[in-house]
Image (tube, rainbow, N blue to C red):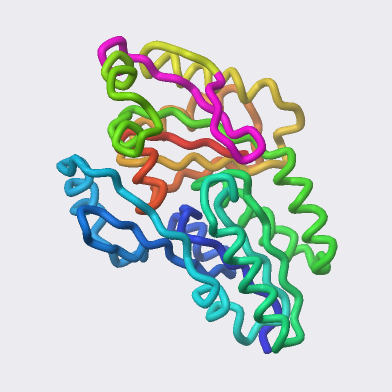
Amino acid sequence: MQKRLIVADSGCDLSEEIKKRLNIEIVPFNIDIDGESIMDTPDVDKKSFMKKMRKSSNPVRSAAPSPNLFMEKFKDFKEILVITISQKLSGTYNNAVLAKNMFLEEVDAKIHVFDSKSASSGETAIAMKIQELMDQNFNFEEIVTEVEDFISNMKSYFILDDFDNLIKNGRMSKITGTIAKFLSFKPVMQGVDGEIQVFAKTRGQLNALNKLVEAIGMEKKLDDRNLVISHCEALETALKLKKAIEQKYKFKSIQIVETGLLASVYANRGGIVVCF
């Protein structure tokens, strides 16, 4: 049997560069749009999906990966570290725990399921942390302790440019969404114990980005952390944000990744997620 594996749901957004560094397998969500069910895998035509999503007046739904999908990834490994999207946003964590319990009834292995209490680049930052500890030859129990501590201290911030999907899914009223667009309202949101809350109300993208950069400065000891920026069709904004952060703070690394289907459903075009 092989030694160690990282498993994450498809809410974990990865660049090709990061994929090469990580010993990771991805378990896909199912995305339902206008009666069509799409498995969130790398071969999906994301541009076509985004066009279809923008044209649709219906909410886009997502279905958590089944326990069996997780169990298929567990085969042939002795130590498995699983990362899921916040359990307050999805049933994925519970399905992964069920898969763990079922698998351990038949196989002698070690499995730990991490609730990321985040999504998108949050899951990416956790995967990078796990790999770093693996590379430093930390044992399984040490990795679990270190990563749970990392998650409890991880910060997540969000800026959305398009509220359409939040309106369609009933997360924001149509009137509020229209006012937000009309006034160029750009709230900076943050993850708090796995839930999304408003951190600051700003107007205009520049003010929102400045407020996000300012928020990073509230944290101490950044030089041993990796910061990950995920974006949905907003590479220029992500690059601008990266430059602003680099000018003010010293991180171990700053990575930019593009959102997969799942994160794109909620971030929508122009959305930015920053985690560290």
Q: Residue 105, image x and y in percent?
A: 72, 84
For the point 65% across and 66% down, the residue is 97
Side (left or right) of 273 relative to 58: right
Visible in this render: residue 235? no
The residue at the far left in this view is 55
Q: Quadrant of residue 160?
A: top left
Residue 136 occupies which quadrant of the picture?
bottom right
Task: Please check the rendered image and state whether residue 33 is part of the magenta-colored stretch, yes or no.
Answer: no
Taking 183 as reference, is 62 above or below it?
below
Q: Is residue 136 left or right of residue 254?
A: right
Residue at the image point whose x is 68% and y is 72% from the top: 80
Q: Residue at x 71, y 36 (%)?
A: 223
Q: Is residue 187 shown in magenta? A: yes
Q: Is 256 drawn above or below residue 83 in the view shown?
A: above
Q: Quadrant of residue 238?
A: top left
Taking the image as drawn, is residue 1 in sight?
A: yes
The magenta stretch is 181-199
Most common SS among magenta residues: strand
